[in-house]
Amino acid sequence: MLLGLIDLVEIEKIVIFLIVLSVLIVLHEYGHFIVARLNGVRVNEFAMGMGPKIFGWTSKRSGTMYSLRALPIGGYCAMQGEDGKTAQSEQQREFRQSGTHESDNFQAKSPWQRLAIVVAGPVANFILCFLILLVAALAFGVQGNKEQAVVGPMIAGLPAQKAGLHVGDRIVTLDGKPVTGGDELVKVIHGSLGKPIAIGYQRNGVVKTVNVTPAVCPKPNPPGQGCIGFTPIGAYSRVGFTEAVRDSFIEFDNIATQTIGGLVMLVSHPQRYAGGVHSIVGIGQAATTIQDFGWGMYLGFAATISFALGLFNLLPIPALDGGRGAFIIAELFRGKPVDPEREAMVHIAGFAALLAFIAIVTFRDIANIVQGKGIF
């Protein structure tokens, strides 16, 4: 019965993650939709989800069909003149050779208009990142210096991990005495170097107790302090609108700096930082863990995913918005589209490399899960 309850909890967390991810992708596509319509491009279908259509409604004014698909993962914006199969330059050539005068065709627009439509999706993700942070700050407050008695990021090989504690566990007792907050938790652990502590923790609604002996804290902590190897999660405090906006800008800047910096380090030192790249499987595992920290932190995580999704799509990789944009930029410099055959070759090679990379990262994430390794 207990195992079934835990499984049900994990399934619920996965469903929540998939819903959040789908919302981020659909709003990414909505960015394309808005700018396409502003530039007079007809959108044949705006779909929520993938796979077989459950139902759809066609707007008499715009001719766009809004559909709901069977698989609630992602969505797409199908524009007139975009088949999603052939290269952009090939579609341009076919459009010009056809002699059609469809003013609402994507291929009929100038390179600058097409580029604006292509990058609108990633830009929508960046805007959404800030809005999510703002909603989280207004609804749940912002993190301060005060800490909760909740297990945060852990250091591998130290007593907490060896004892079986997990990120997200809430510490409720120390040697049978109730814990009132994170400050008290840290104080007791720091003062118990080499002395076993009976730690009572709550996970998935179940309370368990484990004996943990604090070891010497790693540097630069003062000598004589005990540590078990995790950082408590910061507590949230309510703020006004002005402070929420200010804090959201600061958090947005932090997310942007860390994400872009991580990408730069990955490109410059791939062997050292490749282990920090995760597939949808690894991200989902992290999401299920972070949900235990509360909605405030989970929305912050969703904001980070939104920014990363926008940045990833801007990379000049075939099959991504950045890849499409790169060929449009080349067209701007050349004054004419890239040779369709060459573009097709680049797309095939790039797409194959992307699929291989995703497969390798996904396999590694699954292997880590099987071996009981966490993201944190």
Image (cartoon, helix red, strand yellow):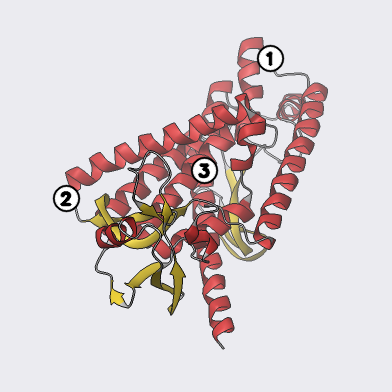
- The label number, if any, that marks residue 336 in the structure image: 1
Q: Provide residue 301's location: percent of width, then percent of height.
A: 44, 51
327 vs 190, left or right, is right
Q: Provide residue 90's location: percent of width, then percent of height.
A: 76, 28
Q: Residue furthest top?
A: 334
**Nearest to N terminus: mark 1 or mark 2:** 2
Q: Which residue is mark 2?
A: 240
Q: Which residue is mark 3?
A: 33
Rounded to the nearest whole Å, what is the CA distance between mark 2 and mark 3?
Answer: 34 Å
Residue at x-position 64% and y-position 49%: 279
372 vs 195, left or right, is right
- Residue kind at label 2, given as amino acid type: Gly
180 vs 251, left or right, is left
Image mark count: 3
Q: Residue furthest bottom?
A: 1
**Nearest to N terminus: mark 1 or mark 3:** 3
Q: Is residue 119 visible?
A: yes
Q: Provide residue 338's location: percent of width, then percent of height.
A: 73, 18
Q: Quadrant of residue 226?
A: bottom left
